[in-house]
Image (tube, rainbow, N blue to C red):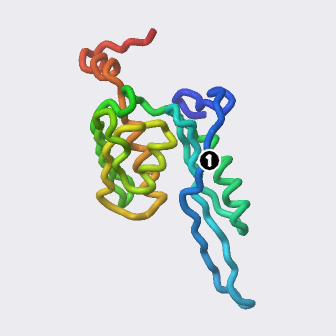
Amino acid sequence: MTKHAPKKRQEDFGTEFEEKVLYINRCSKVVKGGRKFSFSALILVGDGQGHVGYGFAKAKEVSDAIRKGSEAARKNIFTIEMEGSTIPHEVYVEWDGARILLKPAPAGTGIVAGSKTRSVLALGGVRDVIAKNLGSSNPLNQVKATFKALMQLKNREQCFAERKGVHSHG
């Protein structure tokens, strides 16, 4: 068992999740009789209210890969720390070759980001943010980097409490 807080299931949030297929990749393996194809799918789920998750799955059929990816995404949902319609502070993250920079933006700015990062932020409910992908164009690594960045976000109260050395557990 892991020592961190238990992950919330879809039923815990009580809202319906929107599902988005971000990327489908076809792989081929050459065998004696010809080519054998398999597919991988990167799926995103979110409710637009600060909850978002992703899933990556492989299968022999596209529909099976999407279904498996969707199930995986629903198991990995987490809550984004937000301040109004934007993020509380700037964050820079590296994941494999992908480097992502997220900056808070004033209300009305919208989501200024590349396609994969934009999808994650939009489904997560962040409405005003500026993001820049500084590295890899690999969709899976971009999504993982974006999630890592979102997980590092802290609200002002948490930051002040940590600076003081006082942990507010109430």
Q: Please give the residue where the numbered disc 1 appears in the rendered image.
A: 19
Q: Quadrant of the C terminus?
A: top left
Structural crowding at the residue carrying mark 1, measured as other residues with C-alpha within 10 Å and reported as few (<14), some (14–19) or many (≥20) = some
Q: Nearer the viewer, residue 92 or 126?
A: 126
Q: Is residue 143 left or right of residue 93?
A: right
Q: Residue at x 63, y 39 (%)?
A: 17
Q: Is residue 112 left or right of residue 65?
A: left
Residue that sits furthest to the left in the current view: 163
Residue 159 coordinates in the image, percent (x, y) = 30, 23
Say which element carries label 1: strand
Residue 120 coordinates in the image, percent (x, y) = 47, 46
* Count of numbered tags: 1
Task: In the rendered view, tell whether residue 50 sits above or below residue 99.
Answer: above
Q: Residue at x 33, y 51 (%)?
A: 100
Q: Residue at x 30, y 47 (%)?
A: 101
Residue that sits furthest to the front in the current view: 108
Residue 3 coordinates in the image, percent (x, y) = 53, 30
Task: In the rendered view, tell whether residue 97 sits above or below residue 109.
Answer: below
The part of the image, by quadrant, that contains residue 137 is bottom left
Q: Quadrant of the N terminus?
A: top right
Task: In the rendered view, tell whether residue 35 sits above or below residue 90.
Answer: below
Which three-letter amino acid code belongs to the residue tagged 1? Answer: Glu
The part of the image, by quadrant, that contains residue 41 is bottom right
Q: Residue at x 42, y 55 (%)?
A: 142
Task: In the rendered view, tell whether residue 12 sits above or below residue 115.
Answer: above
Q: Is residue 49 left or right of residue 163?
A: right
Residue 127 coordinates in the image, percent (x, y) = 41, 38
